[in-house]
């Protein structure tokens, strides 16, 4: 019985590097891609250069207290606020795309982990999220938006940061091109 278990476990261990990264990227696409892109769209200002001229929604989401203190007038906020909002909006479009196609997967996953941490801190400290929405670890409920769900998001992203994009990724394609030294998965 132990020998059979060892053979099965060994086979799964050999499959893991090829199987888990594409599944993690597909899971990210299915669960979080549209969420992040929809959120980014709420931050874009009017016109073709709207990404460089964030709308009020961006400041409300990212700097709720500073925006309130400025009388809900984004022109009263400085260059720092504009740069953070613009960079965050660009990251919310670009990093998920990189993860889904598997380009610079590890770096994109690390960037998304940072994004989720900042998003969560903004929800708690800026928007005052608490109670059931914040949730608690090691309790009987598993659906709290911040601690429960975002912990799972970070774990998914951490697996991509460690394992890379896998065999069906742009990373792997670039690594196989002659004359490149693009990092590969083991």
Image (spheres, rainbow, N blue to C red):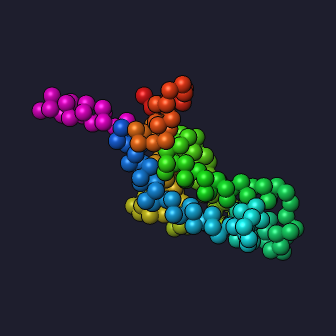
Visible residue check, residue 135? no
Residue 79 locus on image (x, y percent): 85, 57
Asked if residue 38 lies left or right of residue 70, the reply is left
Residue 34 locus on image (x, y percent): 51, 63
Marker count (numbered): 0
Is residue 23 magenta-colored? no
**Image quadrant of residue 42?**
bottom right
Going 41% across and 52% down the picture, which residue do you hit?
A: 26
Which residue is more in the foreground, 161 or 149? 161
Visible residue check, residue 30? yes
Asked if residue 68 lies left or right of residue 8, the reply is right
Which residue is more in the foreground, 119 or 111? 111
Residue 56 locus on image (x, y percent): 74, 71
Is residue 6 magenta-colored? yes
Q: Residue furthest front?
A: 178
Going 20% across and 30% down the picture, which residue do you hit?
A: 6
Decide whether the magenta segment is chiefly helix, strand or loop: helix
Q: Which residues are magenta?
A: 1-17
Which residue is more in the foreground, 74 or 67? 74
Which residue is more in the foreground, 155 or 45? 45
Quarter of the picture holding the C terminus? top left
Residue 71 locus on image (x, y percent): 84, 74
Going 72% across and 67% down the picture, which residue do you hit?
A: 48
Q: Is residue 124 above or below residue 172?
A: below
Quarter of the picture holding the N terminus? top left
Going 41% across and 42% down the picture, which residue do you hit?
A: 168
Q: Residue furthest left?
A: 1
């Amino acid at each position: 019985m132990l020998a059979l278990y060892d053979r099965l476990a060994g086979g799964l261990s050999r499959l893991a590097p090829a199987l888990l990264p594409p599944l993690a990227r597909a899971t990210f696409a299915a669960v979080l891609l549209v969420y992040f892109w929809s959120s980014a769209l709420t931050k874009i200002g009017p016109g073709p250069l709207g990404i460089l001229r964030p709308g009020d929604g961006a400041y409300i989401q990212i700097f709720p207290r500073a925006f309130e203190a400025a009388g809900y007038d984004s022109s009263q906020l400085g260059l720092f606020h504009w740069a953070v909002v613009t960079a965050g909006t660009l990251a919310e479009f670009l990093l998920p795309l990189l993860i889904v196609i598997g380009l610079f997967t590890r770096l994109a996953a690390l960037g998304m982990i940072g994004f989720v941490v900042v998003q969560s801190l903004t929800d708690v400290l800026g928007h005052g999220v608490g109670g059931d929405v914040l949730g608690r670890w090691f309790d009987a409920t598993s659906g709290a938006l911040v601690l429960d769900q975002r912990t799972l998001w970070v774990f998914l992203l951490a697996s991509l940061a460690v394992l890379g994009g896998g065999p069906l990724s742009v990373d792997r394609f670039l690594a196989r091109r002659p004359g490149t030294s693009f990092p590969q998965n083991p």
